[in-house]
């Protein structure tokens, strides 16, 4: 009899704690606000180098790019003879970044300029009239 009372008390306490955790979780879900990112100002640019970039040059290029205002340290990708970087287009543009990089050291490189026929193309890979796209948009709006 005493064991049954202890088991009932233990189960009651555990269910109370579980109920409290569920209430806290629901409170956090209901009151959570989606993060606001300043991503519309983020732009990707590219610099093409004439020769392959070795690891020493890659570190040097990254260090030079990190010192330019408007770029962040984790937004530089160096592969073979191409450097891709992200910059805030309110602070700087690709031409300024290229000119500042060339002023630091003379690299044998040129700035990549997107052809006019590609500049006007849509960049979303999904068909915006598809059911899956519309469903994902509705789910996204519901949670945000």
Image (cartoon, rainbow, N blue to C red):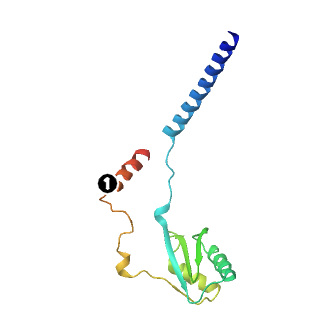
Q: On the image, which quarter does residue 74 sit in?
A: bottom right
Q: On the image, which quarter does residue 116 sit in?
A: bottom left
Q: Secondary structure at mark 1?
A: helix
- Residue under circle 1? 131
Seen in the image, is 136 located left or right of residue 100? left
Residue at the image position 56 percent from the left and 33 percent from the top? 24
Can residue 89 be spotted in the picture? no
Q: Is residue 143 above or below residue 41?
A: above
Viewer-closest of 83 and 66: 83
Q: Residues within 10 Å of mark 1 (few under 14, many from 20)?
A: few
Viewer-closest of 35 and 129: 129
| x, y percent for residue 34 | 49, 48
Residue at the image position 31 percent from the left and 54 percent from the top? 131
Viewer-closest of 90 and 4: 4
Quarter of the figure that contains the N terminus:
top right
Q: Is residue 29 above or below residue 39?
A: above
| x, y percent for residue 115 | 39, 82
Q: Among all residues in the image, which is located at the extreme left?
A: 129
Residue at the image position 41 percent from the left and 50 percent from the top? 140
């Amino acid at each position: 009899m005493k064991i049954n009372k202890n088991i009932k008390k233990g189960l009651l306490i555990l269910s109370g704690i579980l109920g409290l955790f569920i209430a806290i979780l629901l409170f956090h879900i209901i009151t959570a606000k989606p993060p606001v990112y300043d991503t519309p100002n983020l732009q990707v640019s590219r610099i093409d180098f004439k020769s392959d970039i070795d690891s020493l040059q890659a570190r040097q290029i990254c260090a030079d790019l990190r010192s330019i205002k408007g770029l962040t340290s984790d937004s530089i990708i160096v592969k073979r003879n191409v450097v891709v970087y992200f910059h805030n287009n309110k602070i700087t543009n690709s031409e300024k970044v290229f000119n500042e990089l060339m002023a630091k050291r003379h690299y044998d490189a040129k700035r990549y300029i997107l052809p006019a026929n590609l500049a006007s193309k849509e960049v979303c890979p999904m068909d915006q009239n598809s059911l899956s796209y519309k469903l994902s948009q509705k789910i996204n709006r519901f949670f945000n």
